[in-house]
Structures are given as structure tokens and as C-alpha cells.
Amino acid sequence: MEHDETGCQNPERPILCINNCGFFGSLATMNMCSKCHKDHILKQEQAKLVASSIDNAVNGAGSSSSNELIASGNVNIAVASAEREAIGAQASDDLGMNIGIKGKEKEGPNRCSACKKRVGLTGFNCRCGNLFCAAHRYSDKHNCTYDYHTEARDAIAKSNPVVKAEKLDKI
């Protein structure tokens, strides 16, 4: 009686996924379980991207042939191999960029800014932006230019805003 009022009806029996994965499907997901439906949608999107990228590479602009290919659901093996080649070329370009960046990052050994002693991995970064050894890590030992007092005042002012109570009317 309640189902008739809301318009909701339960199916007579559960529907198994059409991919025979063992889970239950629903009409909202084309009789597929949620995982198979999600995979199906991802495959469709990838097919659209591949078809449009190949069409753009061949013709220079989109055409109706890519839409026909997607609508039929058939993707040629050549399309998949072209996609792999494109991904490989992109990966090699990215790798080349990363190698160039890493080459610039490497500098000489890390040294203390005060005494020029090698510190390696045990160096201490100060807020003034320099690297120091264990002996010069404190701000009073290396004539630090960073203003700790101003930072502390700003932090206290930010964490404790001024609170003013409203005036009460006396009776």
C-alpha cells in the first residue's frame, strides 16, 4: 500500500549483472553492477578520446567518422597501438624534462653558512633561509636576520582576536 503511494516498486527478484561477475545489477546501471557500469563508462570515454585524437591528427579537425566509430562501439587495434605510441612519446618527453630539472637541482655539498663546514643530511635549516651545522643552528650563534619577535606578536594577535562586550543598559 505504501509503495503504491510513492510510486516505487521493487523488482520481483534481484537481477544479476549482465557481465556475469556475480553481483546484482539494476535498471539504472543497464542491468550491470556498479563496478561493471563504471568500467563500461570509462571505456566509452577512452574510446571517444582516442577516436577524437586520431581524427584530429589525421584530418586536423573533428568529423562525423569519430562519432560513428564510438556509436558502433568498435575500436580497431591500430587505434589502441597509436594510443600506446602517443603515451610512450609523452612519457619520454616528460622523462626528458625531469632529467633536465634534476641536473639543475644538484649543487655542491651542503655547507654551514657560518663556518663552511660540510653538514650533509644533518644540516639545520633556519628561518632566515640558510643552512647551519649543529654548532651554529641557534639564532644567537649565527647572527640571524629573521625577526622572531614580530612573527610571535603577529601569531598571538591572530590567535587571540580582541573581544569587546556589548554595553549593557542600566535600569
Image: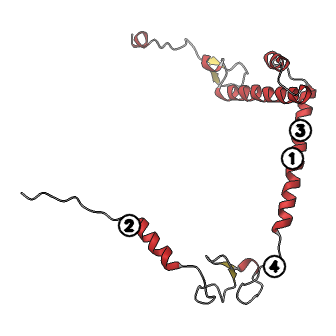
User: In the structure shown, which secondary structural element does the residue marked by tag 4 occupy?
Assistant: loop
Q: Are marks 3 and 2 in contact (CB under 8 Å)?
A: no
Q: Are marks 4 and 1 in contact (CB under 8 Å)?
A: no
Q: Find residue 67 and report its horizontal and vertical position in percent.
A: 80, 18
Is 59 on the left or on the right of 143, as rendered? Answer: right
> What residue is pinned by disc 3?
86
Mark number for residue 91?
1
Residue 22 vs residue 160, the one in the foreground: 160
Q: For the residues carrying marks 3 and 2, which lies nearer the camera in this image?
A: 2
Distance from Cα at disc 2 to Cα at disc 1: 51 Å
Mark 3 closeness class: few <14, some 14–19, many ≥20 residues within 10 Å: few
Residue type at the position of mark 3: Ala
**Crowd tier of the residue under label 4, counting other residues whose Cα lies within 10 Å: few below 14, some 14–19, many 20 or above:** few
Q: Quadrant of the rendered structure where residue 15 is?
A: top right
Q: Which residue is mark 4?
A: 109
Q: Report how far apart the C-alphas of labels 1 and 3 lie in the structure.
A: 9 Å
**Label 4 or label 1, whichever comes before in sequence order:** 1
